[in-house]
Amino acid sequence: MKASMTRGLLACGASLALLAPALSALAHDDAAAAGAEASADAHTARGGPGQEGRAAAVRAAALVAKMTLDEKIQMVHGWSVCGIGFTALGSGLNGPGFIPGIPRLGIPDINYTDGGAGIADCSSQSLPFHPRANPAATALPAPLALAATWDRHLAYDYGALLAREARDQGFSMVLGGSIGLTRDPRAGRGFEFMGEDPLLSGEMVASKIRGAQDGHVVISLKHFAANQQETDRGTSNSVIDERTLRELYLRHFEIAVKQAQPGSVMCSYNKLNGDWACENDWLLNKVLKTDWGFAGFVQSDWGATHSTVKAALAGLDEEEYAPTYFGSALKAAVTAGSVPMSRLDDMVQRKLQAFIASGVFDHPAQVQPIDFTAGAALAQKVASESTVLLKNNGVLPLSRSVARVALIGRYADRGMLTGGGSSQVISPGGPAVVINPDPAKPPCPTQPGPGNWCEIWLRSVPLDALRAALPQSQVNFADGSDPAAAAALAAQSDVAIVLADEWATEGSDLATLTLRRNQDALIAAVAAANPRTVVVLESGNPMLMPWLGSVGAVLQNWYAGIRGAQALAAILVGDVNPSGKLPVTFPAQLADLPTGGGAFLAGDVPYSEGLDVGYRWYDAKGIAPLFPFGHGLSYTHFDYSQMEVSANGRSVRFRLRNSGGVAGAEVAQVYAGLPATAGEPPKRLIAWKRVELAPGESRNVELEIPRPNLAIWDSASGAWKVEPGAYQVYVGSSSRDIRLQRSIVLR
Ligand code: BGC
């Protein structure tokens, strides 16, 4: 463009002398433009983000070429306003990260917010500096619940909502792409993960990221990598062999990076094989940036940077939450030559390119009212699709003519539980209930937003929702604190519904999978009084169920968000047919866990079970879980027939029929058993589809099986390979409810 302007000026016949300074500036710009093209080539050559990505790379490179050293340094670290209160910077909103813009170059301020399960609010951590214009946002069901929908379109919509509400609050960076394969189901952040399978987790988070980035924000995929526990998260060292890493703990990240090209990846607190994740050359430079061609920027988790030169050279592009290592120390290192200027340029280029490519520069976030009606509708849809019917002996759905219902549960008359930590969302009107889980800590504030390390219940009220759904019934409430009183109420009722809950939070893991506060005894007492007992679990972790045999039905409700109660009531009365499927195995006892169920380790944490994680473990060891991965019942029945696998193993077909009396959705799952020589666990998920069918309706389902889904990591050659030999292909309703099977031979 600059070259054509030069030609235009000359064609006008203007005096060359008069034009000399302008021409020299243009020639300089031409050279800069050529440099920008070359730098952009370097940044897109590694499988960068396509045509638009290339244009973004060119534009970013031109900006980098104009920046001073101080301006570059300003770009590679953030300032946390939350909790830390770096308010002297002026325009930082109340968020965990802020990078001031450079007005002379048209670089806008970038404000960060957390957003795993809706746009989080950390205002409670800070003094009343810079309050947000719209502190409240839509509290969506937890990411683990989203994974339980197995619905990629819904994951896209979830991401799109994050982008809309972030922008409505003035944020253009969402720290919201949280995954972390569930190795031990007691993980405190398990509710923020997307389950135990790398394909499900990777594809669901990829859709979420695409939805968000199409909405003009950058989203961060986190926490990279092998960050499976909260116990000593800042000091532990995950010790994992390369094959296990590539096939499991890195695989879901790889899928997300390749399918969605997140603008940012957040490296985690822990060490991986001896090196901090945020200064791990193998992890960041080799795997992420070279092998996968990641073109975005790597940011540290908050306080997870440990060095200047080592981290910069290992591939860290941004330090959060303050410039301890990437401020004056990095400037000195660049000046001294221990970090080359080209590396600093690369850091800045990656960041600018990501924000330009996501449209943040051209569509700056504007504070405006949030559309809470739209938010609530999506929250309810996710809650409806994610609730898993684990058991049903016919007690559900409830009859509309049921006379007396007992609703029992701690706050069933007040609200629904959420998971705690940085992903905590404050919804309109504030929380219904705030509890300090640790009396040793200061009391939880209730205004303007409660501390995000407190137990928070949302204003979505099961008692009200159930009464509205059953207008002709008498719905009575007991809080369950007195099991005898609850049992007496259940005995006088036609059906009893117990809402059991378990709070989990960032910062700590659960010690056991036993429901706290003696809730097992409460459920047992209620079930003894009335066998038509329905248990609803509000939890972010699979819980043990010693009372399972004596209750009529169990629903896994996760942390169901701001419309959780309404979605639950619709399922209980059969207005919505449950269709969620478990993204994690529910064990029968603690000792069955792949980790053995003992205390979480500190220091070195060897992942000695290797590839046998989640259902792979239970299959390999022949252990019967309480409920297997992929399990979820419906109020209708689905029949599977006519399975065919193409000879080259690239597609599978079958016919699915709704043979029951009501409409419903089935998540049909395809697993593969690899040849024995591959040395793999008995089966792995390779494809799935969520299919909605009217009563009596049949449909042919055809699914592609991408080759990488059959591949194994060959440590000897350091590459993926597809093992030749006989493969079993299974089609079923869960990992343990296989309906059809074929074998094929791949050479
Ligand atoms: C969490 C991140 C979060 C960050 C900023 C950290 O403690 O691990 O997930 O994005 O804080 O709030």
Image (cartoon, rainbow, N blue to C red):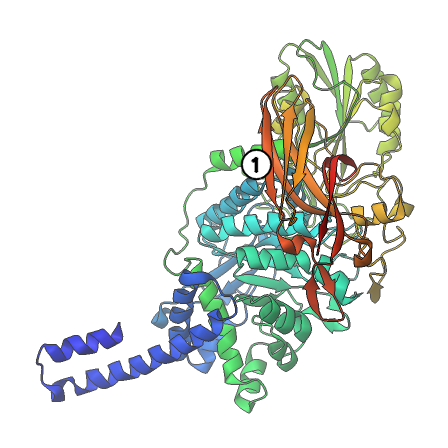
Q: Is residue 725 left or right of residue 84?
A: right
Up the image or down, 623 lies above or below 44; here it is above
Q: Is residue 676 left or right of residue 655?
A: right
Q: Residue at x 71, y 49 (%)?
A: 197
Which element type, helix, strand or loop, lies under badge 1?
helix
Residue 742 in view of the camera: yes
Q: Is residue 102 left or right of residue 94?
A: left
Q: Quadrant of ligand 1?
A: bottom right
Q: Residue at x 68, y 73 (%)?
A: 282
In the rendered image, residue 532, in percent from the top left (x then y), is placed at 81, 17
Residue type, label 1: Ala
Up the image or down, 19 lies above or below 646; here it is below
In the rendered image, residue 152, in percent from the top left (x then y), is placed at 57, 43
Q: Residue at x 86, y 54 (%)?
A: 595
- Of residues 544 and 657, the one drawn nearer to the viewer in this rendering: 657
Residue sitting at the far bottom: 336
- Of residues 239 and 363, the one drawn nearer to the viewer in this rendering: 239
Q: Which residue is mark 1?
A: 379
Residue 493: quarter of image: top right
Residue 253: quarter of image: bottom right
Say which quadrant the N terminus sits in: bottom left
Up the image or down, 453 lies above or below 556; here it is below
In the rendered image, residue 30, in percent from the top left (x then y), is placed at 30, 80
In the rendered image, residue 254, in percent from the top left (x then y), is placed at 63, 60
Q: Residue at x 38, y 80 (%)?
A: 35
